[in-house]
Image (cartoon, helix red, strand yellow):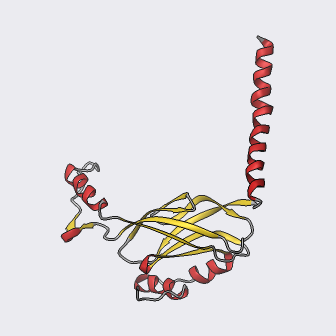
Amino acid sequence: MLMKGIVKNLLWCYLLPLLFLFGVSACQSTSGVKMVGAGASVSNAVANTVIVSVSYDGQWLSGGGGEICCVSLPEDWQPGSMVTIRWVKDPSPGVNLGGVKSPPWNKDGTTSQAWRDWMKVHESQYTKHEVTIPVPKYDEISELNLVFLPCDQVAIIIDSKEAGRIFGYLPGGDAFYPEIQRRLGVKQQCQ
């Protein structure tokens, strides 16, 4: 009985961690690229839309904005690297086709059947998008920030200096979205 416990402890304490480390290092060595964890955020620079969900090369991120932890990025920028971004967009938050607004929730904070029925119709209006674009050069990783722009364009910001240039001292109110778009060089007319 004692011998069985010793073997079990050896397995859990020494052998499994070694196998895990071997497995992780094997994964890293096959790609030859050292990966690091970084924060991630989603910024929507298009008024009157909501980004519902996002994935960055298969790494799921939230929609609604703010920083999300974490994504894996190459520690050093890789020339010629491309990334696929997929997202779901709500093109008309709070309103269904024909201008039908969301019914109220119940007074106790639960959703009513009318709201759930409305939401089924509303979610059918969501649009799905996908784009494969180059990863911009970065020297120092700030975080991964995906900025959603008009015409279903996406800007990737990873470099610390670029993040400061884009997001530093932004105005509030109605000037917020146009200023982000201006700093990113976005054309106002979709083609």
Q: 27 or 188, which lies in front? A: 27
Q: Is residue 156 above or below residue 171?
A: above
- Quadrant in the picture for the N terminus: top right
At a point 37% along the width and 72% down the height, the residue shown is 49
Q: What residue do we see at 73% from left, 51% from top? A: 27
- Left or right: residue 50 versus residue 70 is left
Give x and y (percent) for residue 169: 56, 83
Q: How many marks?
A: 0
Q: Quadrant of residue 79?
A: bottom right
Query: Is 33 displayed left or right of 132 in the figure?
Result: right
Work out which quarter of the rendered image holds the C terminus and state it. Answer: bottom left
Q: Nearer the viewer, residue 7 or 32?
A: 32
Quadrant in which residue 128 is drawn: bottom left
What residue appears at the point 75 percent right and 22 percent down from the top-left corner? 8
> Residue 110: x percent and y percent?
28, 48
- Residue 162: horizontal and vertical position, in percent? 64, 80
- From the viewer's perspective, tell me whether residue 61 is left or right of residue 82: left
Where residue 85 sits: x, y (%)? Answer: 52, 66
Q: Nearer the viewer, residue 20 or 92?
A: 20
Give me the residue at 46% from left, 83% from top. Answer: 176
Q: Is residue 94 above or below residue 168?
A: above
